[in-house]
């Protein structure tokens, strides 16, 4: 049986990098996706030094040509893909909704929503070739309408139009792909990594990247009988 493989976008640092480390430690061959080729190569060298089977692949999720080139390389070298983790994301302007420009919201959606759609569609033939596969959309608790509309929830007061709604949209994308692909043995789920200390938030989060990655890796390694079309935080279902 050939080694299982995983491609992770935005994996040269933070949660994506730690996800690559944890999956690689489980024996997966890792395609470490990075928009910046030099940073991707550097990250791959660091993981390789730990004994992980890793290849850096240049992939800008906002660029159709870049995504197609990355898919073609995976096809040429592996012929299939067992796990896709759509992790790349941007925060955009953290300002009140009335002050956020439409152009900024559009830029956020290009990475956080259209990017995962673009990457998933491009890699779908390789995921089908795996026989059964897992797709994980790295979402956020800030995308949960149930949590955001609950005055008692910790996220209720975090009211960012572009970022929050982009993750809500990504959750909708998750459900759509899950419904279409259920019969083909491909599971599609969303993961909330929690408020994690990263460059995203000036390292103000209370969770470590190790904690955040564990929930993503758990979803990525679910077996054929696992659920699809759900939203999870640390293995527990999150309200849409």
Image (spheres, rainbow, N blue to C red):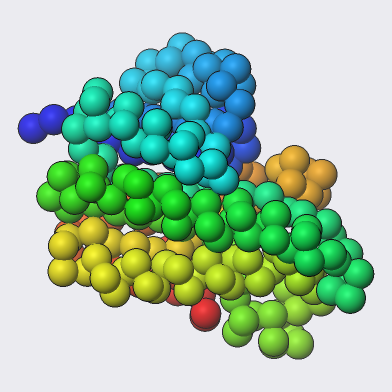
Quadrant assignment, res 144: bottom right
Examine the rendered structure and indicate whether residue 179 appears above or below residue 88: below
In the drawing, does residue 116 fall left or right of residue 179? right
Rendered location of residue 233, percent (x, y): 51, 64
Examine the rendered structure and indicate whether residue 104 appears above or below residue 38: below
- Residue placed most toward the observer, 176 or 85: 176
Total numbered labels:
0
Residue 72 appears in view: yes
Quadrant assignment, res 69: top left
**Residue shown at 28% from the left, 61% from the top:** 187
**Residue shown at 69% from the left, 87% from the top:** 150
In the drawing, does residue 157 fall left or right of residue 183? right
Quadrant assignment, res 23: top left
Rendered location of residue 14, percent (x, y): 62, 37
- Residue placed most toward the observer, 175 or 114: 114
Rendered location of residue 154, percent (x, y): 74, 74
In the drawing, does residue 147 fall left or right of residue 81? right
User: Quick one: which residue is furthest to the front in this view?
Assistant: 65
**Residue shown at 54% from the left, 41% from the top:** 63
Rendered location of residue 190, percent (x, y): 45, 63
Residue 50 appears in view: no
Examine the rendered structure and indicate whether residue 126 appears above or below residue 142: above
Quarter placement of the N terminus: top left
**Residue shown at 61% from the left, 26% from the top:** 36
């Amino acid at each position: 049986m050939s080694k299982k493989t995983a491609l992770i976008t935005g994996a040269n640092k933070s949660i994506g990098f730690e996800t690559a480390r944890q999956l690689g430690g489980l024996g997966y061959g890792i395609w470490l996706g990075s928009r910046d080729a030099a940073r991707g190569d550097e990250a791959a060298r660091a993981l390789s030094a730990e004994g992980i089977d890793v290849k850096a692949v240049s992939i800008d999720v906002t660029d159709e040509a870049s995504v197609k080139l990355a898919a073609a390389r995976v096809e040429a070298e592996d012929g299939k893909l067992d796990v896709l983790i759509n992790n790349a994301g941007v925060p955009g302007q953290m300002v009140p909704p009335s002050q956020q420009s439409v152009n900024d919201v559009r830029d956020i959606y290009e990475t956080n929503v259209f990017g995962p759609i673009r990457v998933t569609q491009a890699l779908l033939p390789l995921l089908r070739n795996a026989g059964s596969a897992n797709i994980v959309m790295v979402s956020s608790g800030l995308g949960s309408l149930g949590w955001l509309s609950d005055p008692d929830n910790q996220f209720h007061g975090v009211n960012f139009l572009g970022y929050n709604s982009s993750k809500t949209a990504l959750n909708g994308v998750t459900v759509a792909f899950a419904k279409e692909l259920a019969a083909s043995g491909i599971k599609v789920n969303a993961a909330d990594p929690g408020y994690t200390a990263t460059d995203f938030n000036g390292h103000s989060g209370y969770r470590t990247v190790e904690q955040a990655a564990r929930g993503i890796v758990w979803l990525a390694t679910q077996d054929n009988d696992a659920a699809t079309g759900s939203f999870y935080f640390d293995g527990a279902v999150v309200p849409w």
